[in-house]
Amino acid sequence: MSRNVLPLLVLLSWASSCYAAAKPQKSSVDGTLTGVVMTEDGRPADNFNVCTQTHFQQGFTNGTSTCCQTTTDHDGRFTINHLKPGTYEVLATNNREGYSIENQSPGQKVTVSEKDARPQITIHLHNRGAVVLGSITDKATGKIIHNAQLAYITIDCGGGGNVLQDDGQYYVLAIPVNCDAVVIATAKGYKGWVYADPASRSRPVLSMATGQRRLLNIELERLPKVSAER
């Protein structure tokens, strides 16, 4: 059984335009990256997002820009066009299958340059996580809340967190395996929610194995309206 709380969760993310952080050189090169994504058992990975990551510094803070603009075909192949010269980390994700940006990072390094404007790579998937599917609905109306967020924080695996938006019906969360994770749902105007293990309510954590899937039907209650003071 789950319970409602208001979690203190701060998730910081740095974003910039795709490839802007690659520290491009002055060049007219329009790079193209091609490759194939393979599963752990050597099969082509069909319908995976292929992402490039670049690192940058904003003030005194280091950040990462992630850009996912292409998917693999039936043979696991992909093409990314219009890359500026620079070094990228390339990875593949499919959150519904347990492959997230978090467990696939860091990606495979590849450099686009004038000497090699069309590099080719093979990406091997690894560290598959468990998958949580969460339907987040308004408790009073039963309607899906499309501005909600589903997140986790690990408490015994080095920490960390993840937030994935909904796909129209379910929120998809790929979490690390064999470690305790606090799973949280939040939405503006609603009370926060955290998963509680029915077998151990004093320890509200979720622990899952590789390939395991869990469906959580989460109902959020609206916060009471506060009357404006005259």
Image (cartoon, rainbow, N blue to C red):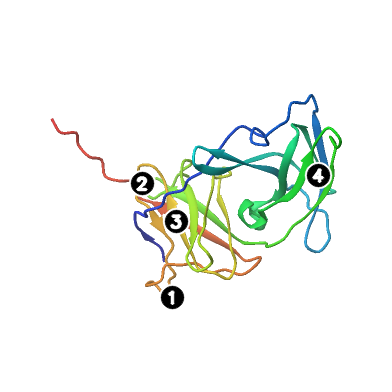
- Residue 141 pos. (x, y %): 39, 45
Callout 2 secondary element: loop
Give the mark nearest the N terminus, 2 or 1.
2
Seen at 68% across and 62% down, the residue is 127
| Residue holding disc 3 | 184
Q: Nearer the viewer, mark 4 or mark 1?
A: 4
51 w.r.t. 98: above or below: above
Residue 73 image label: 4
**Looking at the figure, which quarter contains the C terminus?**
top left
Residue 126 image label: none
Say which amino acid is labelled 2: Tyr
> In whole angstroms, how far apart are the C-alphas of marks 2 and 1?
26 Å
- Give the side of residue 21 with respect to residue 147, left or right: right
Give the mark nearest the N terminus, 2 or 3.
3
> In whole angstroms, how far apart are the C-alphas of marks 2 and 4?
40 Å
Seen at 86% across and 35% down, the residue is 115
> In whole angstroms, how far apart are the C-alphas of marks 3 and 4?
34 Å
Give the mark nearest the N terminus, 2 or 4.
4
Seen at 85% across and 37% down, the residue is 116
> In whole angstroms, how far apart are the C-alphas of marks 2 and 3?
13 Å
Residue 190 image label: 2
The foreground one among 134 and 120 is 120
Q: Are marks 2 and 3 in contact (CB under 8 Å)?
A: no
Callout 1 secondary element: loop
- Residue 140 pos. (x, y %): 36, 48
Q: Label 1 neighbourhood size at 10 Å, few (<14), some (14-19), many (20+)?
A: few
